[in-house]
Amino acid sequence: MKNNKLSAQKYFKTRVRKLPLFECLINTKYKEIGLAQVFISRKQPSGKNAYALFLLDIFCLGLKDSVYSFNIDMDEYKDLTNQLFGNEPFNSIDIIEAHNLIYGTIDCAEEIGFKPHKSFAISEYILNPDLIDDGIDDIELGKDGKPMYVSGSFDNVNQIIKTLERTVGKGNFEFISEVS
């Protein structure tokens, strides 16, 4: 018997971009903490949702990770958004502003040597690059005019520091070691 179920990857590549937008959310304190969680969902014909979550390091590294899924019913959806944003308030964000932030952060990070997480190859399908407008030019990576790298648990700190030294030069970025 042939299995005709769609994988999340295939669904995203073939269908998700055509679905109507359901919701677009962002954590409220992302500018202060340097990490933005942008959550975009689209309504499937079945009434369920497809979503992608983009974790953006707006101070240095760009897109650190993304996750995506589909066929999420409303109870699961509410649980998911409560888990994601339960400890920090979140706001709705305009879809164009979300696109500018995601693509602008990725572009800025690429300019200093950091590629988006490999998951973006699929999660990007929930986005529509045609929605990017002139606001993308207002996106700046860093804090106080220069990159600020805050090390994370899964980062290759030495490699990141070497990349920053090579691309922006010693003394032209801030480094904060993760607090244990």
Image (spheres, rainbow, N blue to C red):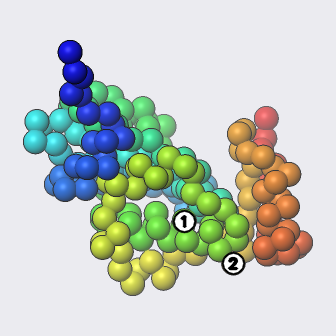
Residue 3's place in the image compared with 41, above or below, is above
In the image, taking residue 75 as reference, residue 59 lies left or right, namely: right
Decide which of 72, 14 is in the foreground and name it.
14
Q: Residue at x 46, y 63 (%)?
A: 102
Of the pair 60 and 33, the residue shown nearer to us: 60
Q: Which mark is residue 106?
A: 1
- The answer to whether 155 appears left or right of 100 in the picture is right
- Vertical arrangement, residue 138 with respect to residue 33, above or below: below
Under tag 1, what secondary structure?
helix
Q: Could you tell me if the residues under marks 1 and 2 are in contact, i.e. CB atoms within 8 Å? A: no
Q: Residue at x 79, y 66 (%)?
A: 164
**Residue at horizontal 46 percent and vertical 52 percent from the top:** 121
Q: Earlier in the sequence, mark 1 or mark 2?
A: 1
Residue 157 % position (x, y): 81, 49
Q: Please say whether residue 27 is visible from this viewpoint.
A: no
Above or below: residue 23 compared with residue 97: above
Q: Which residue is mark 2?
A: 145
Residue 60 occupies quadrant: bottom right
- For the residue pair 7 and 55, the one nearer the viewer reads as 7
| Position of the N terminus by quadrant | top left
Q: Quadrant of the C terminus?
A: top right
**Label 1 neighbour load within 10 Å: few <14, some 14-19, many 20+:** many
Q: Position of residue 110 (x, y in %)?
A: 62, 68
Judge by depth and name the residue closer to the eye, 33 or 103. Answer: 103
Label 2 SS: loop
Residue 61: mark in rendering: none
Q: Residue type at mark 1?
A: Ile
